[in-house]
Amino acid sequence: MTEDQSRHEEFVSLYVRNEAAIFSFVLSLVKHKADAEDVVQRASVTMWRRFESFELGTNFRAWAFQISKNEALNLLSKNKRDRHVFSEKLIAMLADEAEERADDLDFRQRALDFCVEKLPPDELEIVKGCYREGATIRSFSEQAGETANKIYKKLNRVRRNLQRCVEAQLGQEEVRQ
């Protein structure tokens, strides 16, 4: 494999792992989903063009957020005629806050993944059945041969247990930092 191919694969890997966070970050800075999609598209092209300046082993997400923030500010400049556009100072403040929230969401997602892995098989089946794409509690209850009310109560109990587990994991994470 050539160095260019390796670099390309590294970029794609890092970008795909962070794509949802980048989009959420940009969406928090601009008004409309379509604008966010445009900004992310331009930012991803810029990231690819500048990837050789990215130092492997450093924080890709922070680097990508900075490029995305700059693209959002470019959009803001172009749309300045619209009186409903935020100031650059406010955009910068929102960007800083969104970046902090993204890190918190990462911790929460890892904690939730850990807790879901620890669920007993019957509880895991309820979670997967109720949260499967297109599923409802009613459809899962019919499949499971139980009343929707019974599944709803079981699911609420599992949710409470997951919440306690996540909070405990987050508490342990804070101790480690």
Image (spheres, grey):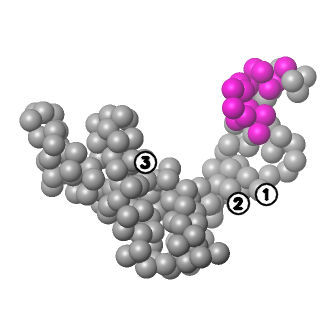
Asked which secondary structure carries label 2, the reply is helix
Mark 3, residues whose alpha carbon is within 10 Å: few (<14), some, or many (≥20)?
some
Residue drawn at point x = 59 percent, y = 76 percent: 2
Q: Position of residue 67 (x, y in %)?
A: 32, 61
Residue type beneath disc 3: Phe
Contact? badges 1 and 2 (CB < 8 Å):
yes
Gap between marks 1 and 2 measured at Cα: 7 Å
Mark 1, residues whose alpha carbon is within 10 Å: few (<14), some, or many (≥20)?
few
Q: Quadrant of residue 171?
A: bottom right
Mark 2, residues whose alpha carbon is within 10 Å: few (<14), some, or many (≥20)?
some
Query: Which range of residues does the magenta coloring cover?
Result: 128-142
> Which residue lies under the disc numbered 3?
23
Question: For the N terminus, which image quadrant?
Answer: bottom right
Contact? badges 2 and 3 (CB < 8 Å):
no
Residue drawn at point x = 44 percent, y = 57 percent: 102
Residue drawn at point x = 53 percent, y = 73 percent: 4
Residue type beneath disc 1: Lys
Q: Position of residue 81 (x, y in %)?
A: 9, 35
Q: Residue furthest right?
A: 145
Left or right, residue 129 beside residue 29: right
Q: Nearer the viewer, residue 147 or 69?
A: 69
> Which residue lies under the disc numbered 1?
118
